[in-house]
Image (cartoon, rainbow, N blue to C red):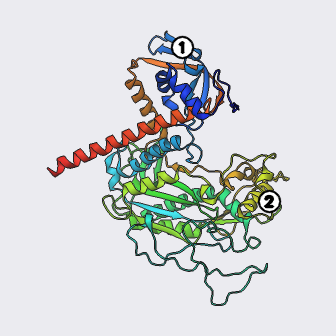
Amino acid sequence: MSTTPLTHYRPGVTVGRDAQVMHRAASPEFSGWLEHTRPADGCSRPIRLTGTIAAVDRNTGRITGQLHTDELPDRTLYKACGNRRESVCPDCAWVYQGDAYQVVCRGLTGGKGIPASVGRHPVVFATFTAPSFGPVHHRHVPRHTCRSRQRCDCRPAPCRARSTAGACPHGQPAACFARHEADDPGLGRPLCLDCYDHAHQVVWNHFSGELWRRTKQAIERHLAALCRKRGIPLVRVVTASGKVRWVPPVRVSHGKVAEMQRRAAVHFHVLLRLDGIDPDDPDAPVPPPADITADDLEDAIHAAARQITVTTPLHPDKPDGWLVAWGEQVDVRRINSTDGELTDCKVAAYLAKYATKATEATGHSSARLTSATIDDYANPEGDHLARLIDACWHLGRPTPTDTSNGAASADHHQDRLDVKPNVYGGLRRWAHMLGFGGHFLTKARRYSVTFRLLRDTRATYRREEDDQPADTITVGTLTYIGSGWLSEGDALLANTAARQRRESRRIGREELAHAAWLGVAA
């Protein structure tokens, strides 16, 4: 009988996944193994740790119990990888998505330490897009007749119809009369690869975080100027060091998610909330002055998006640097807390979903690229994605650095970043992300709760569920020994158990919600 070699050796198991499952399930320790792997049972590639776990009295520091991982099933401790990307680990991404939903939603409705009064603050949902770097295939529905955009079957308009269809300088057609379907793999691809400015796009992705930082500063400055114009006085604030500062009476708190478009240019979905300043507690999210409304916030966003640009540092391939600015499509919408197309819950769920994405929409997915792997993905004569990755690697090459500051622009809204050594080196580090090196979910410090608070709350709940004494803490002295399950059979069993528990919780929530609805209806 032929045998299938295993990546990890397990005595007595020398055949395929089905036999591994049967061998594990038939063992007398199977129930204990399932309980042992429960903290990481849904993870695709859990972290395996070895070492000692001690229970320590919080008050005296005395060790009340000690356990070595050699005494545990598989002689190892399993921990979920915690990866936020759904394409890497769906289960850990599901947990992250739930936390992201709470982070975004608490900033809109309050809860978990955030006062419910934030639900009455003016708030808008803005989308900032990248400019055009060349014509691409796209899908546009001029008029929707469908009931749900999620199941839209409306007929799109021709991609790029032209009355006089010509050709670009490289001989490629300058028009496209196709009506692309939503899943057309050609969406987002340039009409002409040679005309498209791949270098400018990866630089834009790389510096888009700096562009957003300056845009938010401009929004707050616009609102501060409006307060002065309307005679709203400054607020006296005493800092933690005892210094007295006079600050504008309004500030903007935001929650932001980055999304990669099909053309591989990043754009931002941002929730912007108006807050006031409490002199006695500057960190408290209090209502803004009544004279500053959502209309003023919307005007400030549009003004900042039009005016703010960033000129990147000098580069041998671009002596004057690249201009980084927002595209023409800056969409700003109001949020309705009860009903309508944009509600608090819908927006929070939308942003949380994209917080678990990366470059999957473009068709590219890889780990960090190195000199040994770059040739597998980069090609200056290849397709759209290969050229973008090649542009990252080429522009991020080591170059002679200049420590002098860049010349200031005559327009005070257009600033040049100070030249720093190897400022473009990050393009190589983030070539697998097509130049974008920022976080996909960020927020202002005062906007909402933190991921750390949510995780600590979850850990406390688990300790109480395990009946661990409140005055006892767990201290681990652990060493990393590998990633992944020991066999494909173990992965199948653990992931199946996780799905069953998740489905059971979902059904339980639905039954409780239905029972509550029946109680209200009665």
Which residue occupies 44% across, 65% down?
A: 151
Q: Viewed as shown, does residue 477 lie left or right of 512?
A: right
Q: In this view, does 475 lie above or below 209?
A: above
* Residue bearing the label numbered 2: 379
Q: Nearer the viewer, residue 397 or 27?
A: 27
Q: Which amino acid does label 2 sit on?
A: Asn
Disc 2 crowd, CA 10 A, few/some/many (<14, 14-19, 20+): some
Tell me the SS state at disc 1: strand
Earlier in the chain: of badge 2 and badge 1, it is 1
CA separation, marks 2 and 1?
Answer: 53 Å
Which residue occupies 77% across, 46% down?
A: 370
Residue 484 horizontal/vertical position (percent): 62, 33
Disc 1 crowd, CA 10 A, few/some/many (<14, 14-19, 20+): few
* Residue bearing the label numbered 1: 67
Q: Viewed as shown, does residue 278 lie left or right of 264?
A: left
Q: In this view, does 238 lie above or below 347?
A: above
Question: Which mark identifies residue 317?
Answer: none
Tell me the SS state at disc 2: loop
Residue 170 horizontal/vertical position (percent): 79, 78
Residue 15 horizontal/vertical position (percent): 65, 30
Q: Which amino acid does label 1 sit on?
A: Leu
Q: Which of 519 and 341 is in front in this view?
A: 519
Q: Viewed as shown, does residue 309 lie left or right of 405?
A: left
Q: Is residue 347 above or below residue 328?
A: above
Please identify the quadrant where the N terminus is shown. top right
Q: In which quarter of the image is residue 102?
A: top left
